[in-house]
Image (spheres, rainbow, N blue to C red):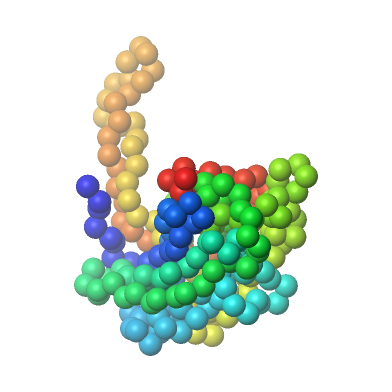
Amino acid sequence: MPRPLPNIPGAVRCVVSGLTPSGRKWANIHHMRYAGGASSPGTTEIDNMDVELFRFYSGTVYAGGATVLSSCSTTVTITQIDYTVLDGAALAYSKPHAAAGSGGTSNLPSEVSAALTLRTTTRGRRYRGRIYLPPFGPSSIDAAGNWTSALRTGLIAQYNGMMAALTPKQWKPVVASYGYSWIDDPSDVIPPSGHSPKILATWAPFATDINSVTMDAKPDVQRRRK
């Protein structure tokens, strides 16, 4: 059963979605925080943020950057971005977008994905995020089967450009940490086998500002996009 979304002051869950060449849906989930969590954003503030988030994917490039869709085939599309303010009360807010890839007509298998790693100044899995981008065209792969350095450099610059453009609008991309994990039961006496029963652990939701983004050369896989 899906768990309810958390309450994180000033934070918004942003779901960018579209279609892959296989006809399956792709989606990227970003989290943004307004005014450092000091106030809750409304539709005007979200509209201002939407301009920059969509620009990361399509449109005018930031300095030194390359949009996501510029490396995708013409059969990869963006159809909308859905926004949910994480205050436990606001309704979802959807912004339609109509954009398609401009990287030619050939494409890699829809399940092949490049992943951006979102980093903060704090170590640990709860302070790190990943974005599995929509499928790219074959020109994004070098002779060794890795993502080209030009692709990685352009996407990182594009994300950094988005972060810079969001700052005067009082928005910052964040890693939002909420959910649960399975840990060893601390009250259990570990048996001779060395295995202890697992218990469900939860924590108070929180968000941490992203300070850098990286991308390795290895292609990843999103099987649900086949």
136 or 214: nearer the viewer: 136
The residue under the point 56% across, 54% down is: 135
Residue 149 sits above or below residue 65 on the image? above
Image spot of residue 101 (x, y percent):
58, 66
Indicate the quadrant where residue 37 lies.
bottom left
Residue, far top: 192
| Residue drawn at 51 percent across, 72 percent down | 99
Q: Residue at x 26, y 29 (%)?
A: 187
- Left or right for 10, reference 122: left
How many circles with numbers are drawn on the protein? 0
| Most foreground residue, 152 or 45 | 152
Front-lying residue, 105 or 205: 105
Give above or below for 100 relative to 188.
below
Q: Residue at x 35, y 55 (%)?
A: 178
The x, y position of residue 83, in whole percent, is: 36, 72
Nearest the viewer among 105 and 161 is 105
Left or right: 122 with respect to 70?
A: left
> Farthest right residue?
143
In the image, is 47 to the left or to the right of 191?
Answer: right
Question: Which residue extends farthest front?
Answer: 105
Q: Position of residue 123 (x, y in %)?
A: 53, 51
* Rendering coords of residue 70 (x, y %): 64, 67
